[in-house]
Amino acid sequence: MTSAAKLMAQSGKCGRVEKMSTFSPLPDWPTGCQLRRAGAEDLSAIRSLVFRAALDPTQLRWQQFWLVESQGQVVACGQLREFVGAQELGSLVVMRDWRDRGLGEALSRHLIAIASQPLYLECVGSRLGRFYTRLGFQAVTWRELPPALQRKFALACFAQRLGLPITVMRFVGEVKNPDWL
């Protein structure tokens, strides 16, 4: 079992996402990284990551966050926002010095696996759109959104019509429980 597999198995319910094809196992996480639920004491670190990434700073409820930590420092975060009839994968940030090590993908896969309702997100730029497509998300129109998310994503959908590279997506892949659970 890889260290990433052991780490995710220790964190609780998690899974591997597959869509149309089989994904390779998650890459090993950097030594010393831990996946854990956020606590109230983590709110300032979460806010700092979100502000530095210029993401939506509203609805930062620490109870909805999962963190990747290394040597006592929060190096990545992401949350599942709750809405009536849906959830949003949001506030996914990896510190610049920690990017390109598989943390964003592993954290995304974990959040996808623990989602309990239809899962949506919005992203900016084609690079992020390709990233989330690879994880099993598909672009949707405003009309395809549940009512609670139509209100939330109305501005993003308007920005799309103006030509800004904002994409609203829904998870359409399958979540498969890995062997280690």
Image (spheres, rainbow, N blue to C red):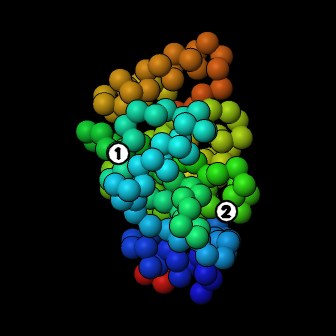
Residue 158 marker: none
- Residue identifier under label 2: 102
Q: Earlier in the sequence, mark 2 or mark 1?
A: 1
For label 1, count other residues whose C-alpha is less than 10 Å away and answer few (under 14), some (14-19) or many (20+). some
> Depth-wise, is mark 2 or mark 1 nearer the camera?
1
Tell me the kind of residue under disc 1.
Answer: Arg
- Expressed as whole percent of the image width and height from the top left, the position of residue 50 reads 53, 41
- Residue identifier under label 1: 61
| Local SS, label 2 | loop
Q: Residue at x 59, y 68 (%)?
A: 70
State the quadrant of the C terminus. bottom left
Q: Residue at x 51, y 21 (%)?
A: 157
Q: Residue at x 64, y 20 (%)?
A: 164
Q: Residue at x 70, y 35 (%)?
A: 126
70 w.r.t. 49: above or below: below
- Expressed as whole percent of the image width and height from the top left, the position of residue 4 reads 59, 76
| Local SS, label 1 | loop
- Expressed as whole percent of the image width and height from the top left, the position of residue 63 reads 32, 53
Position of residue 20 in the picture relative to residue 83 (left or right): right
Tell me how many marks there are: 2
Q: Is residue 21 among the parts visible in the rendering?
A: no
> What's the distance in space between the residues labelled 2 and 1, CA to CA?
25 Å
138 w.r.t. 39: above or below: above
- Residue 83, by quadrant, is top left
User: Is residue 53 or residue 147 the one in the foreground?
Assistant: 53
Point out the residue furthest to the left here.
84
User: Is residue 6 or residue 98 the one in the foreground?
Assistant: 98
